[in-house]
């Protein structure tokens, strides 16, 4: 199995690049943002709870997100590997993911961290807000989401750097050029010299 985390701040292109990675490497895509938005749209109890946090630009509580990921992994027993997009977002989520994968005799192979200057993140998300209809794509909420990233999510990079699994990738080029940089890193792991 090959398990990849696509990591980075809000608007760094995790969702955008996941689509390309999934097509090229045929990994199962698990995006906590997409799963949570689906729960919100269906007005499930989990969705109603999650919406309160998402609308304010805050992270949804760990226990909610970890439970959701655990069920999703169980639904996909034949996966040849996973790409985790937007998860883990706290050290507690990273530790929980490591345990869930260990239980399945597998582990994270590689964490690719998309590096994008802050003003570019804001410009992208404000731009998406013009058409997305997403309640968290407005200037005030975007600022809070970036703050949450610095206070709670950045620690995930150190967690995987300590395991020797973190690679930083420039994410401020075009979508195509960024994908080429990501693919180069993935190929290093999948096609060892
Ligand atoms: P997510 O859905 O994960 O989304 P995101 O951080 O906004 O964006 P992403 O990095 O995927 O950017 P994208 O490719 O879309 O999170 C939303 C919310 O859900 C969180 O704030 C939180 O409340 C909750 N949540 C999710 N996971 C959670 C977890 N694990 N724990 C707790 N809470 C959780 O790109 C953004 C824009 O940039 C797009 O318009 C795209 O077209 C553009 N773009 C991308 N790459 C570009 C490039 N190279 N050049 C120009 N534009 C580019």
Image (cartoon, rainbow, N blue to C red):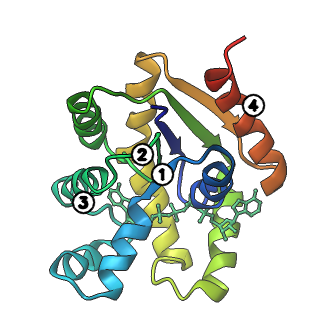
Of 17 and 117, the residue lying toward us:
17
Asked if marks 2 and 1 touch (Cβ < 8 Å), the reply is yes
Who's the residue at 34% across and 71% down the image? Answer: 36
Who's the residue at 77% across and 46% down the image? Answer: 178
Cα distance between the residues tagged 2 and 1: 6 Å
Q: Is mark 4 on a helix, strand or loop?
A: helix
Asked if marks 4 and 2 touch (Cβ < 8 Å), the reply is no
Q: Is mark 2 on a helix, strand or loop?
A: loop
Q: How crowded is mark 2: few (under 14 residues within 10 Å), some or many (20 or more)?
A: some
Q: Residue 157 carries which label?
A: none
Cα distance between the residues tagged 4 and 3: 31 Å
Query: For this view, does 114 lie left or right of residue 178?
Result: left
Which residue is identified by label 1?
A: 28
Query: For this view, does 58 lie left or right of residue 189?
Result: left
Q: How crowded is mark 1: few (under 14 residues within 10 Å), some or many (20 or more)?
A: many
Q: What element carries label 3?
A: helix
Q: What element carries label 1?
A: strand
Whichever of callouts 1 and 4 sits on the residue coming sooner in the sequence is 1
Which residue is identified by label 3?
A: 68
Looking at the rendered image, the disc whose residue lies closer to the viewer, 1 or 3, is 1
Where in the image, quadrant-wise, is ligand 1 located? Answer: bottom right
Q: Which mark is residue 79?
A: 2
Cα distance between the residues tagged 4 and 2: 22 Å
Q: Residue 10 placed where, x, y %?
A: 53, 58
In the picture, the quarter occupied by the N terminus is top left
Q: Which mark is residue 184?
A: 4
């Amino acid at each position: 199995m090959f398990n990849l985390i696509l990591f980075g701040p809000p608007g760094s292109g995790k969702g955008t690049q996941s689509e390309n990675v999934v097509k090229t490497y045929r990994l199962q895509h698990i995006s906590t943002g997409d799963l949570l938005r689906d729960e919100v749209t269906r007005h499930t109890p989990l969705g109603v709870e999650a919406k309160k946090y998402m609308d304010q630009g805050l992270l949804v509580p760990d226990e909610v997100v970890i439970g959701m990921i655990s069920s999703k992994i169980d639904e996909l027993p034949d996966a040849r590997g996973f790409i985790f997009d937007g998860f883990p977002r706290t050290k507690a989520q990273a530790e929980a993911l490591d345990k869930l994968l260990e239980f399945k005799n597998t582990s994270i192979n590689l964490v690719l961290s998309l590096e994008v200057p802050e003003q570019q993140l804001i410009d992208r998300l404000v731009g998406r807000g013009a058409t997305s209809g997403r309640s968290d794509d407005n200037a005030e909420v975007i600022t809070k989401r970036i703050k949450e990233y610095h206070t709670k999510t950045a620690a995930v990079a150190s967690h995987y750097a300590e395991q020797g699994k973190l690679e930083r990738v420039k994410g401020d080029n075009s979508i195509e050029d960024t994908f080429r940089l990501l693919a180069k890193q993935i190929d290093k792991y999948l096609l060892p010299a």
